[in-house]
Image (spheres, rainbow, N blue to C red):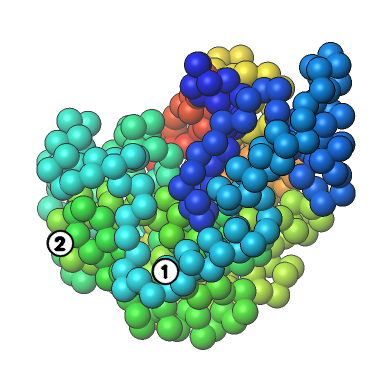
Amino acid sequence: MPSPIPEQPGLLLRDPFRYTDDILVIPPAWVPVLQCLDAEHSVLDAQAILTRLSHGQIVARKEVEQFVAILSQSGFVEGDELEALKRERHEAFRRAPTRQATHVGSAYPADAAGIEARFSSERLCRERDPDATLPIALAAPHVSPDGGFASYRAAYDLPPVSKPTTFVILGTSHYGAPERFGTSAKPFETPLGTADIDDEALAQFVSQAGDAIVEEDYCHHAEHSIEFQVLFLQYHFKQPFRILPILCGPFVESLMTGKPPESIDGNRRVFDALAELHTKRDDLVWILGVDMAHIGTRYGHREPVRAGEGVMAEIAEHDQRRLERICDGDAEGFFDLVHPGGDELNWCGYSPIYTFLRSVGSAVKLKGDVRAYEQWNIDESSVVSFGAMHFSGG
């Protein structure tokens, strides 16, 4: 992404998989050299590009080699260094007894007292109706809590839990393989405690879903879409509960072909397995950790955008049409709005939402209620939309 540091302009590189913790800023003059790192260009090609851009000032071969060496040592170039980092991180995650909080201290405070203070200042503690019942499902953002507190507050405005409950959390997998679903049997830790896994539900799901499942998916290590939901559940309920965490990879094939995701056998088996799980269990509440549109220069668009202004007012109208289909439990209608143009709105919540509509929506008649809708400038020229929904089912 463009460097956010005024005194260090250029291209900022970071690794969302966290194979490396290094963050590099490539100076503007050296950014064009990155196109040479494709196993088809030589050092001489890079020298030629730099010389042309510097109006004839020759750049030494040693400088190019040092530049590539820094990228390699930091894990930003395919090769032995990156493979070693990957093996080390995957093995560490496999051996870990719990899924430790990854975004603690950055997306939210690093200790329980700090979380309590921050969340209570946003009025996340409300007087609750003791006679109210939990919805069959809710949708919440996975955007940074600082940007989405109003929607988180609306999503997690819930009554107390009156019986043992398992929350099936369907989160966007930002880094997972297309048409794959990632699970983990590791309890999730945050500064507010540990959320245990519903081992019985996990075993049933994995046994029925087949090879569309990636067990102990490393993407859980870096992903925030489920971690944030666990944190808000812990804050609100302050009592033990179990979870079934499922990361939903992108449905790329459906966006390319226009065929619904269930036309792929693996996706269909997952939908059927989740539908059966819902039918057999009466203690499940479904959580969707989803954002909506991603518009602006950060996401590959030419023009900068501002929340609620200009083109983003039109985006809000498109979002609302999709939300209407979701609230009606209309998976087919939702898909018909998403797939044209390969989803020009870049809804990263497409796969978890569609998975929910096709699985739970096949077992019950869903009716949703939009509790909040927001747009937020994630930077000066890019906007993310998100919101909150509650679902009932008959």
Mark 1 vs 2, N-terminal side: 1
Q: Could you tell me which residue is drawn at 66 percent across and 74 percent down?
A: 266
- Using a 10 Å C-alpha cutoff, classify the residue at mark 1 as few (fewer than 14 neighbours), some (14 to 19) or many (20 or more): few
**Image quarter in which the C terminus is found:** bottom left
Q: Is residue 37 above or below residue 162?
A: above
Reading the image, the residue beneath label 2 is 239
| Left or right of residue 199: residue 356 | right
Q: Which of the two residues, 98 or 294, is positioned nearer the viewer here? A: 98
Secondary element at tag 2: loop
Q: Is residue 342 above or below residue 170?
A: above
- Left or right of 140 in this view: 353: right
Q: Residue at x 84, y 28 (%)?
A: 49
- Dot 1 falls on a residue whose secondary structure is helix
List x then y, in percent, for residue 167: 33, 64
- Of the numbered discs in the image, which one, if any, rests on residue 92? 1
User: Quadrant of the image for the N terminus?
Assistant: top right
Q: Residue at x 42, y 68 (%)?
A: 93
| Residue 173 rendering spot, x and y as whole percentages | 54, 56
Residue found 35% across the figure and 71% down from its top: 96
| Residue 71 in picture, x, y percent from top left | 62, 44
